């Protein structure tokens, strides 16, 4: 219905011209920058003409101090008189005769907007609460109890059967970093109406969400919760030390789908790695398990790719050796075999590219042979083959909160972006966490659950639909870190290596030694 509206023709003048889809964006009084951005994104489409119906914006995204922004977030907004506000805007809307009305403001009722718009009315619903205005203060209040906020772009009208979801996403409002996380969330939401016009998907009915009912009911209570949370983090940070390690499971990766599975992890004593060894990938070759992982070089302030050989029988590892040291931070050394050769695709987001490295003398000598994607900031690039195509998934987009997909017919062919990029916005399951695998005819994609913090746990997503124009997946299994394990505080990578599975684990400690290490590393960086 939306795609048909974009291509239709109307005769509004004497000339025989192709008319654009007219969209009216009803902004709140003193419209925020992100509402103006919504109009800009819509006007960037070739077949859309969008206009902002509302007061001029009071401020822009740049040039505003932190104090003023925080006061605007916390200060309650005066309620506008609907009787005084609506007539003027209704006259403007009637004169504009829009096909679609995007409502940011509640001064115009849904019923009045539906009577004017020909193709329906779109509005944002935060946690499925229509009476809550979409603003920074709303995101701040709703993230008081949990940092995860759900937002939907919904549509209703005579052409729709009830309220349907056109686009949806979840955002993590972090502490500290409140201003930046709210700004990124609003900026991402501003692009949704344009995506819904340009890349329409099959709408689905809106259902109630029971998960979001325990939020604070006032800005004061939300501010108190955030103040306590910020104080706890500020006091704990100087004493905090994060230690990552790598473990081996003597089972194939698909056994992690079993609900009653008791996983026994053998943690490797990787001598010489300091306190950071993560992102494990491995290949079985010449009776050894060749492990590649990220070793963070504290003296250089960036990660390098290291290698260690593991004896499959005793699970003893050789001392690590750096095999890929780049001018930028390197991590997540994704491995694959292709036409008899071994390739590695490390994360090099700082270089703005996704590069392919070939093993010249496995496992220690590598050479860069191709750039799969250029001018792209992509984290944790994951390459896999499915249904006769090569797929490349990674974390990207504004604020690095979206799942991005590319596809190609061959590994060295032309890589094309997915028609609905970004295909997913949800911190619970967007960031790749290892090697996708097939089991019982189904494709599963490991992902990180970053809703409560980076590297906390892993989810296995069952891919329901994957094509150049469609993508859908659901969480099939949640893998928690082992409570009694040495690395009990988190995990963010799970990879397959034949009949073995590799994971990494996080251990958080608090001690005076952490403060000494911080001063020592800061001094080494200055030198």
Image: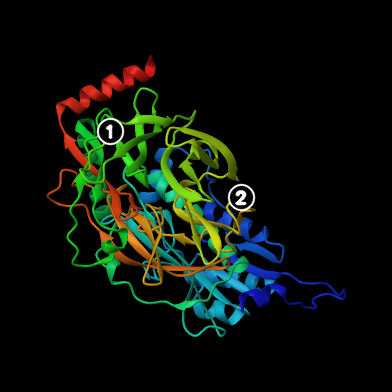
Mark earlier in primary sequence (1, 2): 1
Residue 180 in percent (x, y) is at 42, 44
- Label 2, residues with CA under 10 Å away: few <14, some 14-19, many ≥20: few
Disc number lying in front (1 or 2): 1
Residue 119 location (% of width, % of height): 61, 78
Residue 2 image label? none
Q: Residue at x 63, y 56 (%)?
A: 40
Question: Where is 344 relative to 259, above or below?
Answer: above
Residue at the spot of label 1: 318
**Secondary structure of residue under mark 1:** loop
Q: Tell me what residue is drawn at x 35 percent, y 32 percent.
A: 296
Direction front: furthest residue = 286
Residue nearest the observer in this picture, 188 or 251: 251
Q: Residue at x 29, y 53 (%)?
A: 500
User: On the rendered image, what quadrant is the N terminus found in?
Assistant: bottom right
Give the camera-side residue of 8 and 488: 488
Q: Dot 1, crowdedness within 10 Å: few (<14), some or many (≥20)?
A: some
* Residue 46: image location, x then y, percent: 72, 62
Label 2 sits on a secondary structure element that is loop
Distance (Cα) linking label 1 and label 2? 34 Å
What residue did someone put label 2 on?
A: 412
């Amino acid at each position: 219905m939306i795609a048909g509206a974009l291509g239709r023709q109307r005769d509004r003048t004497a000339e025989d011209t192709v008319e654009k889809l007219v969209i009216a964006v009803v902004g709140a009084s003193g419209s925020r920058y992100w509402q103006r951005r919504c109009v800009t994104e819509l006007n960037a489409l070739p077949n859309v003409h969008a206009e902002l119906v509302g007061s001029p914006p009071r401020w822009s995204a740049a040039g505003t101090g932190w104090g003023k922004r925080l006061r605007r977030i916390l200060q309650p907004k005066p309620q506008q008189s609907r009787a005084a506000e609506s007539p003027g805007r209704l006259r403007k809307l009637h004169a504009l005769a829009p096909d679609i009305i995007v409502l940011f403001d509640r001064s115009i009722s849904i019923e009045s907007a539906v009577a004017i718009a020909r193709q329906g009315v779109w509005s944002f619903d935060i946690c499925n609460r229509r009476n809550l205005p979409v603003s920074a203060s709303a995101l701040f209040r709703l993230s008081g109890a949990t940092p995860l906020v759900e937002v939907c772009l919904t549509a209703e009208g005579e052409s729709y059967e009830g309220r349907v979801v056109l686009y949806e996403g979840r955002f993590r409002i972090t502490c500290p970093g409140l201003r930046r996380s709210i700004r990124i969330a609003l900026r991402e939401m501003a692009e949704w109406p344009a995506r819904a016009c340009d890349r329409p998907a099959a709408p689905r009915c809106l259902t109630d969400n029971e998960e979001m009912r325990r939020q604070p009911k006032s800005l004061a209570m939300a501010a108190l919760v955030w103040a306590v949370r910020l104080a706890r983090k500020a006091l704990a940070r100087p004493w905090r030390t994060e230690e990552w390690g790598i473990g081996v499971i003597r089972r194939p990766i698909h056994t992690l789908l079993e609900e009653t599975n008791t996983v026994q992890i053998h943690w490797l004593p990787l001598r010489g790695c300091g306190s950071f060894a993560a992102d494990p990938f491995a290949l079985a070759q010449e009776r050894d398990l060749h492990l590649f992982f990220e070793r963070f070089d504290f003296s250089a302030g960036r990660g390098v790719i290291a290698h260690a050989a593991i004896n499959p029988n005793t699970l003893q590892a050789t001392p690590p050796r750096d095999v890929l040291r780049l001018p930028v931070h390197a991590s997540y050394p994704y491995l694959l075999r292709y036409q008899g050769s071994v390739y590695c695709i490390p994360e090099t987001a700082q270089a703005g590219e996704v590069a392919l490295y070939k093993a010249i003398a496995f496992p220690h000598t590598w050479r860069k042979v191709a750039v799969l994607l250029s001018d792209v900031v992509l984290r944790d690039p994951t390459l896999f083959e499915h249904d006769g195509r090569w797929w490349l998934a990674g974390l990207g987009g504004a604020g690095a909160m979206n799942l991005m997909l590319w596809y190609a017919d061959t590994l060295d062919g032309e890589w094309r972006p997915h028609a609905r990029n970004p295909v997913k916005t949800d911190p619970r399951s967007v960031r790749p966490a290892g090697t996708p695998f097939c089991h019982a005819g189904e494709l599963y994609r490991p992902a990180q659950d970053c809703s409560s913090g980076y590297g906390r746990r892993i989810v296995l997503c069952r891919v329901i639909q994957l094509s150049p124009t469609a993508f859908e997946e659901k969480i099939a299994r949640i893998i928690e870190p082992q409570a009694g394990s040495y690395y009990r505080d988190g995990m963010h990578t799970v990879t397959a290596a034949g009949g073995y599975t590799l994971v990494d684990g996080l251990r958080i400690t608090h001690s005076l030694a952490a403060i000494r290490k911080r001063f020592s590393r800061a001094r080494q960086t200055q030198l």
